[in-house]
Amino acid sequence: MRLRRNLANRSCIVGAVLLGLLPAGSALADYAYVTNQSSSDLSVIDLDRMVEVERVPVPGAPAGIAVAPKLGAVFTVSPDSKVLRRYGMPVGKPLAERTLDGGPIGVAVDERRGRVFVSDWYNARVWVLAADDLSTSQMLSTGSAPAGLALSPDGQWLATADRDANQVSIFDAQTLELRHRVTVGQRPFGITFSPDGRLFSADVGSNTVTAVDPVNGQVLGHVATRERPYAVAFAGGRGFVTNQYDDSVSVFEAQSLAAIATIDTGEYPEGIDTTADGRRIVVANWFSNSVMVIDPVSLEIVGEISTGDGPRAFGRFLSAAPMPSPGLAEQTGAPALRP
């Protein structure tokens, strides 16, 4: 089954937003924080109104992103300049930044323990940093070329996708001790925990998603995808996988791993995440310079919003946060750049 997006419907949605005919949302809104690698900036998008409300410069071609609503923070990783930055919410000037000697790419936040994890692509390791001042507390060894990072919903596990080792590394998130190294599909890149605690890797080299039990390190099964799966998100008992080379999202049943549908997206979809209430899936389309919003029940695209150039959104990039008040740029010192 392949669902074709309805261009006419999408145009109506976007037009209604531009004309101000859709409701502005409540005081607490879902926001997307999208790293734009080619234009070196961060798009802040109000998903209730489906508009970009801010675009903040982030030097060094940012890719990795992790939002931490409990800490009121947004973390970005710029591989070109090797800089990790911490921003507040709303986003303005960086509150802290740190140059990391290596190949930083992925980032994840342990909000309960005040830690930030950054994968080092070149040196098969993970930096463990303090979330406030970004000081290093420890280094973890992984397999070759670690990319994506993820924390389990219960805070028990930290996992890395070790692309060139065809494996995932699973650590105890409390003690940071290595518990398992599990062979998955070829060249895993994005990695995600499902709401029930299972671990899923997007295997770009074998066009599969691999499900792993983090407790015993056993592979539970595989899902066939389209070309070059990049990242995985979950909503409504379903898994959603971005397929870079197919311009699509594969949908599968989370428990049985059975295929459900394929949804056409923009060009070269990469980052994917779920809103806190599970009612929307958001996909970043690198070549289309946009994000698309998917209804996980109907599997229809319900909106598309323009971003900067080359949106990656590699990591957790959605968060429910208070809506910014007028004059956000003046309050935070951030330029109010528009498309």
Image: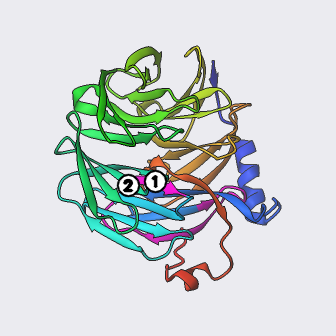
With 17 as the anchor, is 3 left or right in this view?
left
Q: Position of residue 311 (x, y in %)?
A: 45, 53
Look at the image and tell me whether residue 231 can be seen.
no
Q: Position of residue 95 (x, y in %)?
A: 41, 74
- Say which residue label 2 marks: 116
Element carrying mark 2: strand
**Residue farthest to the front, as pictured:** 175
With 211 as the anchor, is 118 left or right in this view?
left
Mark nearer the viewer, 1 or 2: 2
Residue 46 among those drawn in magenta: yes
**Magenta-highlighted residues:** 45-68
**Residue farthest to the bottom, as pictured:** 330
Q: Residue at x 39, y 16 (%)?
A: 218
Q: Is residue 287 above or below residue 97?
A: above
Q: Position of residue 163 (x, y in %)?
A: 27, 32
- Say which residue label 1 marks: 66
Element carrying mark 1: strand
Q: Is residue 190 above or below residue 256?
A: below
Q: Residue at x 44, y 77 (%)?
A: 93
Three-letter residue code for mark 1: Ala
Which of pointers 1 and 2 lies earlier in the amino acid sequence?
1
Q: Where is the N terminus found, in terms of image quarters?
A: top right
Closer-to-camera residue (90/173): 173
Q: CA distance from mark 1 to mark 2?
A: 9 Å
Three-letter residue code for mark 2: Val
Q: Is residue 89 above or below residue 336?
A: above
Look at the image and tell me whether residue 276 can be seen.
yes
Closer-to-camera residue (309/332): 332
